[in-house]
Image (spheres, grey):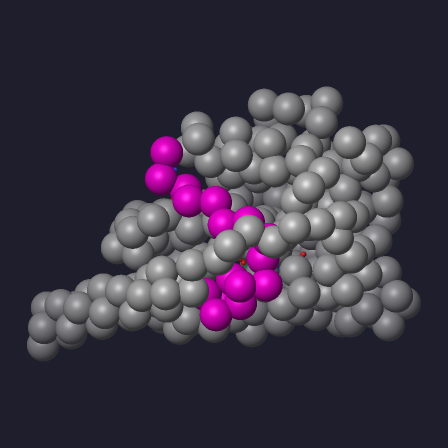
Amino acid sequence: MTARIVVLSAPSGGGKTTIAKAVRERYPEKFGFSVSVTTRKPRPGEREGVDYFFQTRAQFLEGVAAGRFLEHAEYGRELYGTLKSEIEKVLKSGKHVLLDIEVEGARQVREQYPAPRSVLIFILPSDPRVLLERLHSRKSESPEQIRWRLDRAEYELNQATRFERWVHNDDLETAIEEVSAIADDPQVGQTREQQDFEWITNYGRGLMEAAQRLYDEQHQQKG
Ligand code: ADP
Ligand code: 5GP
């Protein structure tokens, strides 16, 4: 199979970072990773050049003007982008390149790397309450940031229909193997899987209801 771009997107808490890391660690000869640039501050334990290249907004915008990005987008008031140099480095080595990016970036990648040169995978646990739980238990965002990310999830779920495959991240092991198999499947991108629109619509509704219950509880505790 020719090396291609494998895009993983998910609402926040869906598991794309965990899966991208696990797939790369398990199959280092088959997958490389593109380190993104961001203007957000590093979280505890995050390392420059490993998790992200951390830049100021001015540096980032200079990179945009110089045409260094394959795609870039704003998310939660911060800028994120994929460097063309990162992609080229991995593809030249003959490996698939894994991108853990949000949906707007996925759309831009698809424009420049039409199927089957790219494959778009949308990741989310089957139960929206699990998504909410995982987002909270990660403890890396403030309540305001979580709220913003949940609002954003509604838009992201609407974009899921652009993606060729939906991987249910319930059992991590199964999800890792599914992503790896999809990357190697030459049919993916040529044919579109039958998508369950009703399921994704209900999912969005379930997520919003679960989030609302949580806000109400938090409000009651405060008051
Ligand atoms: P994303 O990058 O999509 O925002 P993460 O990869 O950070 O999501 O996952 C959100 C949280 O859920 C993390 O704490 C992660 O350890 C946990 N998680 C991810 N996948 C699973 C899984 N299959 N089972 C249990 N916990 C998971
Ligand atoms: P976080 O701040 O949690 O690391 O990432 C926030 C969001 O930005 C996630 O949805 C993540 O996938 C996305 N993201 C990370 N890197 C990139 C990138 O290079 N481009 C785009 N478009 N989104 C990115």
Tell me if 213 is positioned left or right of 195 in this view. Answer: left
Out of 37 and 175, give the one closest to the viewer.
175
Q: Is residue 169 magenta?
A: yes
Q: Is residue 144 magenta?
A: no
- The residue under the point 13% across, 68% down is 217
**Quadrant of image for the C terminus:** bottom left
- The residue under the point 41% across, 71% down is 154
Give the vertical position of 109 relative to 171 (above or below): below
Read off the magenta span: 156-171
- State the image coordinates of residue 198 (x, y, percent, origin top left): 37, 65
Q: How many marks?
A: 0
Out of 43 and 122, give the one closest to the viewer.
122
- State the image coordinates of residue 70 (x, y, percent, origin top left): 80, 60
- The residue under the point 52% across, 44% down is 17
Out of 79 and 40, give the one closest to the viewer.
79
- State the image coordinates of residue 147 (x, y, percent, origin top left): 35, 70
**Quadrant of image for the N terminus:** top right
